[in-house]
Image (cartoon, rainbow, N blue to C red):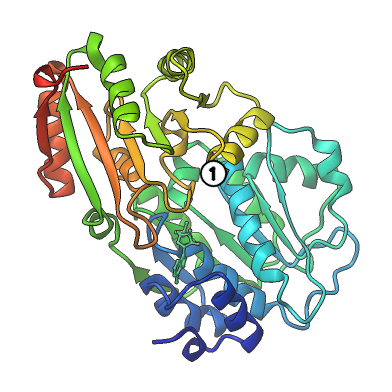
Amino acid sequence: MPFKALGLAPYLVDAIADQNYKKPYPIQEKAIPFILKRKDILGIAQTGSGKTAAYVLPVLMNLKGKTKTKNRHINVLVLVPTRELAIQVEEVFRSFGKSLPYPFKSFAVFGGASINPQMKSLQNVNVLVATPGRLLELSESNALHFSELSMLILDEADKMLNLGFKKEMDQIFALLPPSRQNLLFSATLSPDVQKVEGVLLKEPTIIKIEDAVDNISLINQVGYFVTPDRKGPLLRHLIQANNWQQVLIFTSTVYQADLVADKLFKNGISARAIHRKKSQGNRKESLKSFKSGELRVLVATDLLSRGIDIEFLPHVINYELPRSPKDFIHRIGRTGRAENPGDAITFVTDDDKHHFRVIQKKMKRWVTMVDSENLEF
Ligand code: AMP
């Protein structure tokens, strides 16, 4: 089914063609017609499924005739768990918003950055993408008003609840006008998400996209048995011998992320670490130079395993295994996205062997293993 059959306006269909989207992803095909009809939606979908455009496009259309806001009143609120996702989602709104034949402004607010410039930019905003804590701070300072709000979107609701935002979310819901359209997206339908769903959604259309495992078939996975002391040399060998130019590496701790990035840097491979201890400015800068191809290696903790979309990322390396198989799937899901194949490499020590078997069982894929002892580097 082509995009134009979903009921989207021609200017949006043109904007989609400019983004080189050839046909709708399943979540888009299923969700867009219902969102246009102003139904509430519960979307169970992972990052990488195309869920952002699935709500951005119809929300922009539903805004027609409503974009003249009083000062500091917003029309649409999108709540997200992290600043990176806030920035990313706002960029999608902005890029499609350019094509609208009516005035439109989107803006992102998040903690960890100073509040004053954010406050000043809240004039005439139609779509606000926000992390919960910062949104409440802005509302308490009277910098924001909700009486003209007609749509609420919760993106990665499960992650928001995991990060302990439940109380803030409830406080926010209480501030919003009761008559509105609600869209809730989550990778899983955990009991906590179900509770929020019960309070928030009215007769929702439920859309479930099981793409995480499907996506995996696009990924060439290889595991290396390796001793802890040979991980660093093996990492450098893989990057240099294969001449990989854009590599995302996952570690399980902030300390290890810094260590791996430092060691690569000292060996002449441009690398930076990204994790919760880095400032917002530093994280933004690292992501930007990694996305543009300037920075060769980004070493991340699981902060980045969800929500962040890096187009055509060719190589992901699990320097250490995550505890949860779901996190493993999210991590390797940074590659093999948007219908592009990619490589995912996993380092497995003796201590990891049992856990890696559990992960493989969960993802329903057996990974080819190589014994790095037989490799010369
Ligand atoms: P998301 O799940 O929203 O993070 O989107 C994942 C990636 O898929 C992003 O890079 C989008 O630009 C891309 N994308 C979304 N919809 C489509 C589509 N219909 N065709 C091709 N790429 C798409």
243 lies above or below 198: above
Q: Position of residue 284 (x, y in %)?
A: 63, 36
Crowding at dot 1, Cα within 10 Å, few <14 / some 14-19 / many 20+, comes out as some
Q: Position of residue 295 (x, y in %)?
A: 53, 33
In the visual, does 77 lie left or right of 16? right
* Residue situated furthest top in the rendering: 229
Residue hosting label 1? 291
Query: Residue drawn 80% across and 61% down?
Result: 125
91 lies above or below 54: above
In the visual, does 363 lie left or right of 130? left
Residue 16 in sight here: yes
Pick whichever, 14 or 78, lies toward us.
14
Q: Amino acid at mark 1?
A: Lys
Within the image, what quadrant is residue 177 found in? bottom right
Q: Position of residue 96 (x, y in %)?
A: 65, 70
- Quadrant of the image for the N terminus? bottom left
Query: Residue drawn 21% across and 56% down?
Result: 217
Pick whichever, 311 or 201, lies toward us.
311
